Amino acid sequence: MTAQAGAPLLEVRGLRKYFPIVKGMFRRVVGQVRAVDDVSFTIQEGETLGLVGESGCGKTTTSRCILRAMAPSGGQILFRSRQGAMVDLAPMVRAELRPFRPEIQMIFQDPFSSLNPRMTLLDNVGEPLLINGMRNRRERTDRVAELLRLVGLRPEFMHRFPHAFSGGQRQRIGIARALSTNPRLVVADEPVSALDVSVQAQVLNLLLELQSRLHLTFLFVAHDLSVVRHISDRVAVMYVGQLVELAPTSAIFERPRHPYTAALMRAVPVPDPRASNIGGALKGEVPSPAAPPSGCYFHPRCRFADERCRRDAPPLREIAPGHFARCHLAEQLNLDIRQG
Amino acid sequence: MNPAPPLLSVRDLHVSFAMDEGLVRAVDGASFDVLPGQTVGIVGESGCGKSVTMKAILQLVEQPGRIASGEILFRRRTGPAATDGEEVVDLARLPSRGVEMRAIRGAEIALIPQEPMAAFSPVHTVGDQIVEALQLHGRQWRTDGGPLSRKDARQITVDLFRDVGISMPEQRIDAYSWQLSGGLRQRAMIAMALSCKPRLLIADEPTTAIDVTTQAQVLGLLRELQRKYGTAIIFITHDLGVIAQMASYVVVMYLGRIMEEGPVDDIFHAPKHPYTRALLRSIPSLYGRARVALPVITGSLPHPFNRPAGCPFHPRCGDVIPGMCTTRVPSLQNIAARQQASCFLYHDKADPA
Ligand SMILES: Nc1ncnc2c1ncn2[C@@H]1O[C@H](COP(=O)(O)OP(=O)(O)OP(=O)(O)O)[C@@H](O)[C@H]1O
Ligand SMILES: Nc1ncnc2c1ncn2[C@@H]1O[C@H](COP(=O)(O)OP(=O)(O)O)[C@@H](O)[C@H]1O
Ligand code: SF4
Ligand code: SF4
Ligand SMILES: [Mg+2]
Ligand SMILES: [Mg+2]
């Protein structure tokens, strides 16, 4: 089930976000952390794009740029307005962004800290509505009741405070809050990472159901590949600020074209004691985006690395229709995700 | 062949917290054994009593909690020298702050805690903290059981750092915990836990907060160290993949009780208890069908003050036997050679409620 037919809702082109490294008393800039370095992808209307990678690779920074919670250092963030035109959010200032705020909303990782503990559900869920101009309390109350029902919570709960709810219920509250303004794009940053398996399954089901009912488009950030596989139409893999692979979900899991993607997949402990799979773990650590290695950023950890890999940075190339990989050897390698 | 006697035997353990709102029965009759050198995995949802069980074993249950009843039989060494023997003590009866319990916590049972930052003090280097522990409890590194000099302790610490895969160990032991990356801190924590050659290592969600790749490295490391030192491990997690890869014996907990326990292969390939079965069905896999609704366990965990009567799982169980499961509490019984379950589908023995 893919939604390729739709027009792109979001088109990210050459996105960059550099953070200055400052030193000493005079806060001299001595370098740059290239947290996001020339990232491009599109998301079709109604589609879910999964974004995966190790901690620090730039997933959250990418999401926060798209939400315009921070200003990118370069590149374009083209978003289709309700009128159908593609508008670039990247250079916009606060006032220009205002009409787009309700359209792009966020679901956070931590259901415990993302809600205000001193506000009732009514105020937590209704806050984006208030910010976006729904001043009438009666109207907000009705909308919050509808939203709570939508995410499977009882509307009577709206006068309670977040502490009275379990992790899974709080994540539902966070989802209700994100959906309050009828967004078209929902950015979910690790929305089920903090949840127990049984609760995680309930939340994943809810997201799938809401997507088909409300025709939502998702950017789904996660580090758990089985979760990403379950929910995404296409998957993008990030490493040290860059995309290293981008492909339809079935294609990337059947035959990953980048050694890093394959290593990530092999690192997921298989819930079957007869299939031992944690022996061939990826060695070494993620390089710092402030001082990435020469050539291919992955070469110090790649078992296929040769002279060219140490010297030349591979471009992101289309290996098969819709399947992109940033590896010199993408065509030759026959990567197996099940064992070392 | 007789199996080795258990290193640890938890018998009908009850731990409760007396709160203003009522009594929380965090652990409500848990029984399981850990054999020498074995890895026992404990799975269960948040709040089911995994950490409290471990704190009880170490006599570290916080106020207003207390061990209400039960036994925690541990086979301890009678002295640090290789020639010293063993004896069984009931940890549930030992005073928390007494010398005996402190010696056990220092040298016999080590904990890798759930909150990684809590393991090290931020004001001393990680090396100094391990050296200090070694000087207090590290006598088993010497065959004669004598105390370690500071120089020896430092050398052992460097070797341990190398063992857990920390590069440049001589420099790294002089770092503070907050200077280390998540993966390195995890490794330093394992080095600290292993420093006194414990016979039992309790790892409480040691990899929940870290990346899959680092997790795979840490899991591989734990396996290797276990082979080398023969340490028994209790591995707590709610990740069934981690359990399948690490444990040889599995204990499944729900609301402070053990639903099922048995060898890892039986738990994954012949699960008996409805809760275990439901849990296994609800995980997305790398190979199954994508973008379809996952089977879920309906409802949610009841509030700790609102324990259901009868079988604790009955409000969410698809196989509930009305009148039976709703009123009587199934006891943990043998249902196969080494598999045990508390469920009336397999027997009719109840515990006093
Ligand atoms: N200090 C405390 N005071 C009161 N209740 C407590 C305390 N510590 C734990 N509990 C209660 O005991 C029960 C078991 O908690 P425990 O920490 O053992 O859960 P767990 O299985 O380790 O969960 P998690 O997977 O979230 O770590 C819970 O109901 C919890 O609220
Ligand atoms: N505000 C900031 N200032 C400086 N560096 C930052 C900031 N936010 C993120 N970074 C750095 O950018 C990189 C990417 O971070 P992030 O997007 O949070 O990664 P992820 O979400 O993939 O874990 C990391 O090296 C991080 O340390
Ligand atoms: S370009 Fe070379 S080093 Fe980089 S992933 Fe491909 S084979 Fe490995
Ligand atoms: S005892 Fe009854 S309610 Fe409990 S798990 Fe078994 S069948 Fe279900
Ligand atoms: Mg992040
Ligand atoms: Mg715990």
Image (cartoon, coloured by chain):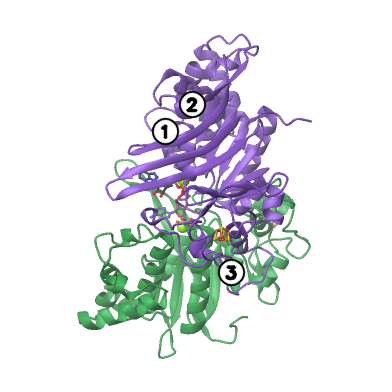
Chain colours: A green, B purple
Query: Is disc 3 placed on a helix, strand or loop?
Result: loop
Asked if the residue at label 2 sits under 8 Å from ligand 1, the reply is no
Q: Is there one chain holding both mark 1 and mark 3?
A: yes
N-terminal of the pair, mark 3 or mark 2, is: 2
Tag 3 or tag 1, which sits nearer the N-term?
1
For label 1, being within 8 Å of ligand 1 is answered no
Q: Is residue B326 above or below residue A21?
A: below
Q: Is residue B302 left or right of residue A331?
A: left
- Secondary structure of the residue carrying tag 2 is helix
The one nearer the camera, B314 or A87, is: B314
Residue A194 in the image: state x and y as whole percent: 47, 57
Q: Which residue is mark 3?
A: B295
Q: Front-most of B279 and A171?
A: B279
Looking at the image, can residue A49 be seen? yes
Q: Mark 2 sits on what residue?
A: B105
The quarter of the picture where the N terminus of chain A appears is: bottom right
Residue A256 lies in quadrant: bottom right
Q: CA distance from mark 2 to mark 1?
A: 10 Å
Asked if the residue under mark 1 is in contact with the one under mark 2, i.e. CB atoms within 8 Å, the reply is: yes
Q: Is residue B299 left or right of residue A308?
A: left
Q: Give the chain of mark 2.
A: B
The answer to whether marks 1 and 3 mark residues whose Cβ atoms lie closer than 8 Å is: no
